[in-house]
Amino acid sequence: MAARGVGLLTRLPLHSQRRSRVQRSISRHLSCPGTVAANFGSEEQPSGGAETGSEDKTPKKRFSEVQKERREQAQRTVLIHCPNNINEKKFLKYLSQHGPINNHFFYESFGLYAVVEFCQKDSVNSLQNGTHTPNQRTEPAIPFKSRFLNLKLKNPSNQMPEQSYAQINNQSPPSSKKLFELLSYAESMDDQLNTLLKAFQLTEENVRLRHLTCSLIEDIAAAYFPGCVVRPFGSSVNTFGKLGCDLDMFLDLDEVGKLNVHKDAGNFSMEFQVKNVPSERIATQKILSVIGECLDNFGPGCVGVQKILNARCPLVRFSHQASGFQCDLTANNSIALKSSELLYIYGSLDLRVRALVFTVRCWARAHSLTSSIPGAWITNFSLTVMVIFFLQRRSPPILPTLDSLKSLAGAEDRCILDGNNCTFIQDVYKIKPSRNTETLELLLKEFFEYFGNFAFNKNSINIRQGREQNKPDSSPLYIQNPFETSLNISKNVSQSQLQKFVDLARDSAWILEQEDTGQPSPSSKRPWGLAALLLPPGVVHTSLSKKRKKPVSEKVKSLLASIKSSTTDTSKGTRGKRAISTQA
Ligand code: GTP
Ligand code: MG
């Protein structure tokens, strides 16, 4: 954590920068021993590593366990908009009259906010009972009681901010300048990939804020559907999320009206009167429509609400201004949550998986292969599945196929959703670690080479079986949906976007093959290794052009020609020898 207004770049690990001595001592003073979250903010790894146990000795928890703990933690937490000159110590003392505080942090997003986690849920009720609705003199307001609060100073002049300024937790990804600086200090390419992972992965605080935001939205949705649950999914929870990624959540109504007491004995059973609708889709649209209205009219901090109800997967999109998250709310999306769990398992199986996925995602973003706007481009989800597939294809494989994860499953893992078999083992300890010892540097180069030479024109990518299969239709890129196996998750990708991906993969493989991309002397300012790959095309080409005899395109052309000429029978082709074609 850096002091407000101070943007120093140091080579300290990022998680060390985030914590201040002041906050540590205050938190320790006020924390309640014995709670799960009491270790928050200790010198542990940021969330991705901490939750999967991939970077330290933390036990690898089951996805469902992590989600349950996070949800429970979020329910004990409040979000408070604070005056800029808040005195941290007095603030905590004031709040602790409602009960002990387990943890807290401050961040900035159009103002200063505090996330405060109490030890007990009752403290939140006590705080809410001591909170009043503002008397708006200028603009009328709709009264709404939530866990999103506003702190006012009664006597601002009496505050002595210089004695105890609030320490600010950074919620943004590093700037390009900072990233390149970090990469230039790395000792090897493997080190660079791990550095990039640490710089971009969601922090513990960011993960908490994501779960809190879902919990706040759940409170609003519960006005219509008491007992509903709003669950985060996608990159916020699958451990592949980059700082700044959107917040995907879905409204789960399965818990509503579930029998929790068994009073069903005898000759009678009672059920709720409900309204029938012609289809599941119409039900989803109706539900999302009223929730969208509710968020728009009464949701504190929810702005720019758009109801996108005619999409294949109807959704409500909005900005949660206080957290700074772009949110997509869907309904009945349990398969997407199961996909998130599957990615979580893959991410926790081997240390190299997340580093490689983050690198490929950043590479794709740097070269505008991906975008935050939906379109004909490849998505981060598809890229992640491609990396998983590639790692299944290594020899020996680094990741198991989905079918083998299914074969390891026990009765407790059985899961059928909308008629699709989504069963796989949930306990990562029951999966044998890989014997593959390849370096990240090699894997990255081979990834580019593999997909730079993939027969996209005839083959599909299938992580269920871990092998290429004939494409069932003429989509330029066919990646089988792991659970709804008749669907293609990259149906949206156009031929030109696929070609752009292939061209960049080939260029990148070529760049990594060049001997002069090894780490230069410390005095050299030349970007090397991963840094060279992440620079925009013009820049990287200039930086390498001094030593290059031919432009990239010519070099690549001759490289490809030599591969083509050495391959007469494409069906027998092995990696790097297959004929290159991206034509559908
Ligand atoms: P970010 O780009 O970091 O947001 O990655 P993400 O994984 O969160 O992707 P996105 O927000 O686009 O989608 C959220 C989740 O929805 C993904 O993780 C998948 O579980 C699921 N999803 C996205 N696209 C598809 C698709 O085309 N088919 C299916 N079945 N699921 C999808
Ligand atoms: Mg997302």
Image (cartoon, rainbow, N blue to C red):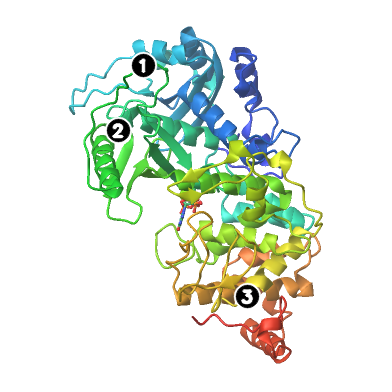
Q: Is residue 505 above or below residue 183?
A: below
User: What is the crowding at mark 2: few (fewer than 14 residues within 10 Å), some, or many (at least 20)?
Assistant: many
User: What is the crowding at mark 1: few (fewer than 14 residues within 10 Å), some, or many (at least 20)?
Assistant: few
Q: Where's residue 346, x and y in %?
A: 64, 49
Q: Is residue 479 above or below residue 179?
A: below
Pointer 3 residue Cβ closer than 8 Å to ligand 1: no
Mark before the other along the chain sequence, 3 or 1: 1
Q: Which residue is mark 2?
A: 299
Local SS, label 3:
helix
Q: Amino acid at mark 2?
A: Gly
Q: Is residue 490 above or below residue 254?
A: below
Q: Which residue is mark 3?
A: 452
Q: Nearer the viewer, mark 3 or mark 1?
A: 1
Quick one: 462 or 519, which is closer to the camera? 462
Local SS, label 1:
loop
Q: Is residue 527 visible?
A: no
Furthest-top residue in view? 97
Q: Amino acid at mark 1?
A: Gly
Task: Name the side, left or right, on which 561 lies relative to 118.
Answer: right
Q: Amino acid at mark 3?
A: Gly
Q: Where's residue 502, x and y in %?
A: 57, 75
Local SS, label 2:
loop
Q: Where's residue 471, x and y in %?
A: 52, 73
Quick one: 115 or 527, which is closer to the camera? 115
Q: Nearer the viewer, mark 2 or mark 3?
A: 3
Spatial CA distance of label 3 from label 1 is: 66 Å
Mark before the other along the chain sequence, 1 or 2: 1
Q: Is residue 318 visible?
A: yes
Q: Which residue is mark 1?
A: 266
Q: Where's residue 372, x and y in %?
A: 43, 57
Q: Name the residue located 32 percent from the left edge and 28 percent from the top edge.
A: 222
Spatial CA distance of label 2 from label 3 is: 47 Å
